[in-house]
Image (cartoon, helix red, strand yellow):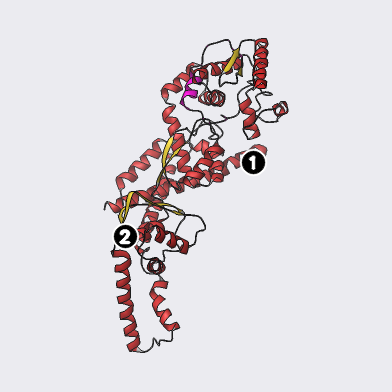
Amino acid sequence: MKEMKSLRRKIDRLDKRIVKLLNRRAKYADDIGKIKEKKRLDVYSPEREKQVIENVSRENPGPLTDEAVKRVYERIIDESRRLERESAEERRVSLRPSKFGKFFLMDMLQSNGINLRDKKNLALLLLSAVAAFILLWFIVFITPYHNAHGKGTILTIERGMTADRVYSSLAKDNLITNRFAFKIAARIFAVERKIRAGKYLFTGHFSDYDVMELIASGKSNLIVTVTIPEGLTVRQIASIYHRELGVDSLQFVDEALGDSMAAAMNVPSINLEGYLFPESYDFYYGTDVNDILSRMVDEFKLFFNDSLRSRAMAIGYSVSQVMKIASLVEAEAKVDSERAIIAGVYYNRLKKQMPLEADPTIEYALGEHKRIYYKDLRIKSPYNTYERIGLPPTPICSPGRKSILAALYPAKTNYLYFVATGTGGHRFSETFREHLRAVRAYRKAMMRE
């Protein structure tokens, strides 16, 4: 029974991941449909559908038969096609006048006592409405065109921001001609209910119509360069993306530290800790969390190529083990020339079945970067390398290129210990007695300061 429950839990996690992946696939298919629509290409592509079926059949490892996989993907393709049709139709009708727009002027006149049943009044009303609408359209949407100088103007729409505040921000930044006219037009075209939080970039020449269309799309066109430094944990990386891109940091952490994401991305670990490659990335503001994670993992895979995988095999360690060592090196090393030596110390201790006794793993278990006390060394955690022999369950941070290469090409020494010198480097020792002398020297240096 216990084994059955465990398998069912795994199935539930896979189902959750499959649903997310299917929806991401549908989104990409819809984006392709939009591109085809702009370029006036045929939406239906039988050659592409045949290629998809051939691809999934070729990659099918079993136990499902190729015929079963083919039936599933034919259904997925049908759904993608339906989504593309509905999305195209939605874009065509999104700016048609709403019910509010149809009856806005009539309701206003009725409230002022005008009898709409009188045929003359009704005819005049309709003519006035048409004339007013044409005039409003000309003033708001046709002239004048705005011009954003230099790098353009960024509009930030915060979560919970009312439509009136959005219109005020647009007027303040001179992105629209007239706040009141824009507000009326937004109501007529039912745009104000579609306004989405985000950051929007306006460059070059644009009209009020362009402004309305962009803020109603909910898709930011602002590209933000985000730099992720080496040695950060998933939680620290999530904080940066929340600040720079406005993503949900809790969702980012949940997805990155969940086992389903690691399995779906073919990462040799129980989660993505350590595999979010530190680099500078260009993302649209508000990019989906899963897209960010996929991009960072892909960047790791590009770096850790077949040549480096072969090197890992040559030294007798798996990619997972190398990444754990690399994360310890990243957390410990402050001087580049010491990275390979520190890696060599850890390998030497592993071979002798000695605990690694790495302070950064204690900090990771505690969940904060702090001074380590003796009481902290007794924390009950699989990441406590003082009490447990071997490597931690996962990397403890995202190592950079230099630390990964140091873990793959460690220095060959007899060192088993190292301690900080207090000036950024470390003092290395072969014996415990030498190590104790180095520790005492370090403490004396700290006391003098």
Task: Reply yes or no: does residue 271 show up in magenta.
Answer: no
Magenta stretch, main secondary structure class: loop
Q: Secondary structure at mark 2?
A: loop
Specify the quadrant of the image occupied by residue 167.
Answer: bottom left
For the image, the number of numbered tags is 2
Q: Nearer the viewer, mark 2 or mark 1?
A: 2
Q: Which residue is mark 2?
A: 207
**Label drawn at residue 323:** none
Q: Secondary structure at mark 1?
A: helix
Specify the quadrant of the image occupied by residue 395.
Answer: top right
Residue 409 point in image, percent of width and height: 48, 17
Question: In this view of the protein, which residue sits in the foreground, 19 or 133?
Answer: 133
Task: Reply yes or no: does residue 410 show up in magenta.
Answer: yes
Q: Which residue is mark 1?
A: 5
Question: In this view of the protein, which residue sits in the foreground, 309 or 370?
Answer: 370
Q: Is residue 358 left or right of residue 408?
A: right
Residue shown at 41% from the left, 82% from the top: 109
What amino acid does circle 2 point to? Answer: Ser
- Looking at this view, name the residue that lies furthest to the left: 40
In terms of sequence position, does the residue under pointer 2 or pointer 1 come before the other?
1
Q: CA distance from mark 2 to mark 1?
A: 59 Å
Residue 190 point in image, percent of width and height: 41, 66
Q: Is residue 368 left or right of residue 74?
A: right
Question: In this view of the protein, which residue sits in the foreground, 349 or 182?
Answer: 182
Residue 244 point in image, percent of width and height: 47, 44
Q: Are circles 2 and 1 on residues that touch, CB within 8 Å? A: no
Residue 178 point in image, percent of width and height: 37, 66
**Mark 1 Cα within 10 Å, few/some/many (few <14, many 20+)?**
few
**Mark 2 Cα within 10 Å, few/some/many (few <14, many 20+)?**
some
Q: What range of the chain is rendered magenta?
A: 395-416
